[in-house]
Structure formats: C-alpha cells, structure tokens
Amino acid sequence: MHELGLCDALLKKVKQIAEDNELEGVNSVSLDIGTLSGVVPNFMADCWEAVIDGTPFAETKLLIRSVPGIAQCLDCGLSFEANLEKLVCPACSSLKLNPVSGRDMTITEIEGY
C-alpha cells in the first residue's frame, strides 16, 4: 500500500509549509487525486488518519477531490475520460493510449491558523 508512504511524505510537506509560514496549526489539507494516478482515495484517507495520530496534526482533515483522467488514443486520436480498470479506446478499441491528465496528486490548499 503505497498510500502510507504518500501520506508520510504529505505530512512532512505540510509540516514544512506550516513552519515556513509560521502557522500555529492546520485545519485541513485539500488534495486533487487523478484517477490515473494509481492512488486510491479511500486508502489515502485511512492512511492519513494513521500518520497524523499522536502528532500536532491529529485534528487536521484531509479533503480529497477526484480528478478524471483523460487519455488520447494514438490510433484514432480520440480524447476520452479514461478508467484504470478499462484502458481501451471507446471508439476503436485500441490499447495504444497516451495519458493526457489525471496522473497527478496535488496539494491544492492548506487551511492554517
């Protein structure tokens, strides 16, 4: 479960941002997670609870927004919303696809005080 490692790295980044901005605390962290990233939002949420337990960030909420992945077919050129469970062009059934977006995980907001 790589989400545990991602949450550990996320907490380190949040700590650094809080220190750099002289925040007393952090209410929430907002993430955009692409559907082609391989990150499972539910696992991410569970792992977040584990990594913040017993830390000064124990009350920090993790707010996750799923961002659709877009792929482009290299055979027919169609751009479409792609799904990791079924990576095939809906127009021509090609498996030759180029991911255009949705492979990232991005911190979009940190609400501090």
Image: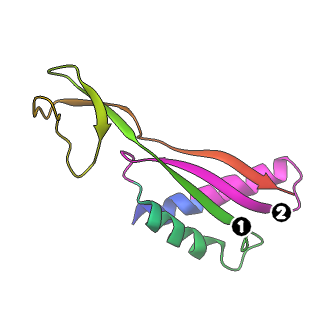
Identify the mark at residue 25; answer none if there is no mark.
2
Which amino acid type is marked by label 1? Thr
Identify the mark at residue 60; answer none if there is no mark.
1
The residue at 89%/52% (across/down) is 22
From the viewer's perspective, is 81 left or right of 89?
right
Is 28 a magenta residue? yes
Distance between the Cα atoms at labels 1 and 2?
8 Å
Magenta residues, start to end: 9-38
Which amino acid type is marked by label 2? Gly
In what quadrant of the picture does the N terminus appear?
Answer: bottom left
From the viewer's perspective, is 86 left or right of 108?
left
Vertical placement of 82 versus 77: above or below?
below
- Give the SS element for disc 2: loop
Badge 1 or badge 2: first in the primary sequence: 2
* Circles 1 and 2 in contact, beta carbons < 8 Å: yes
The residue at 10%/29% (across/down) is 92
Q: Specify the color scheme.
A: rainbow
Q: As drawn, which residue projects farthest toward the front?
A: 91
- Image coords of residue 51 (percent x, y): 60, 71
Question: Which residue is more in the foreground, 9 or 99?
Answer: 99
Identify the mark at residue 31; answer none if there is no mark.
none
Q: Quick one: label 2, few (<14), some, or many (20+) residues within 10 Å?
A: some
- Image coords of residue 8 (percent x, y): 58, 63
- Image coords of residue 16 (percent x, y): 75, 52
The residue at 70%/55% (across/down) is 14
- Give the SS element for disc 1: loop
Q: Quick one: label 1, few (<14), some, or many (20+) residues within 10 Å?
A: many
Q: As drawn, which residue projects farthest toward the left?
A: 93
Please tell me in which quadrant of the rendered image residue 36 appears. Answer: top left
Please count the marks in the image. 2
In what quadrant of the picture does the C terminus appear?
Answer: bottom right
The residue at 61%/58% (across/down) is 63
